[in-house]
Image (cartoon, grey):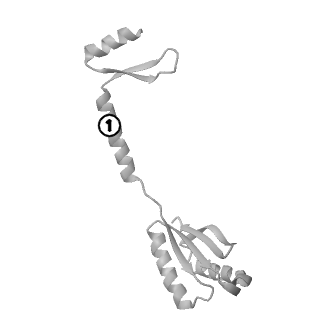
Amino acid sequence: MSSREAQRRADDEGLDLVKISPNAVPPVCKIMDYSKFKYEQSKKEKENRRNQTVVEIKEIRLSMTIDVGDIAVRTKQCLKFLEAGNKVKVSIRMKGRENARAYQGVKVMEDFFEGLGGKAVQDKKPATEGRNIIMFLSPAKS
């Protein structure tokens, strides 16, 4: 139908004529209450934002000479982060002569991961990047 006729019908009903796809030939329009449509759309967006979960990346720092008790404390903290649904970045910063023995740091990371008891999944395996050894963990799906 012509745009004038469509506009007249919309005015008779007290509604708005809204272009759905203006680039189509001929343009596609719809007769609706535009303010009600915008209100419902904003409500849906607010509901989606409320239901959205933000995943944070928490960081745990280890050292190459860490002791068993300290690893237990860090493991407990890591499990708390994972249970909250966060990802965890585990890092070791090597100093001085430790750079020559990066494999020891990787071994510490692997032992740390085994201590988590399968409650985490490695997103990125321990890798040496300059003076740092970095590993990313995420919560295991139950």
**What residue is at 65 percent from the left and 81 percent from the top?**
94
Is 18 rendered above or below residue 140? Answer: above
In front here: 67 or 102? 102
Residue at point 47% right, 21% down? Answer: 22
Residue 99 coordinates in the image, percent (x, y): 71, 82
Displayed quadrant of residue 33: top left
Q: Position of residue 104 (x, y in %)?
A: 69, 84
Read off the residue under disc 1.
40
From the viewer's side, name the closer residue of 102 and 14: 102
Is residue 70 in view from this perspective? yes
In the rendered structure, the answer to whether residue 62 lies left or right of residue 47 reads right
Q: Quadrant of the N terminus?
A: top left
Q: In the image, what residue type sits under mark 1? A: Glu
Q: Residue at x 57, y 91 (%)?
A: 67
Kindly tell me whether residue 116 is visible in this rendering: no
How many residues crowd around disc 1 within 10 Å: few (fewer than 14), some, or many (20 or more)?
Answer: few
**Above or below — where is 141 with respect to 115?**
above
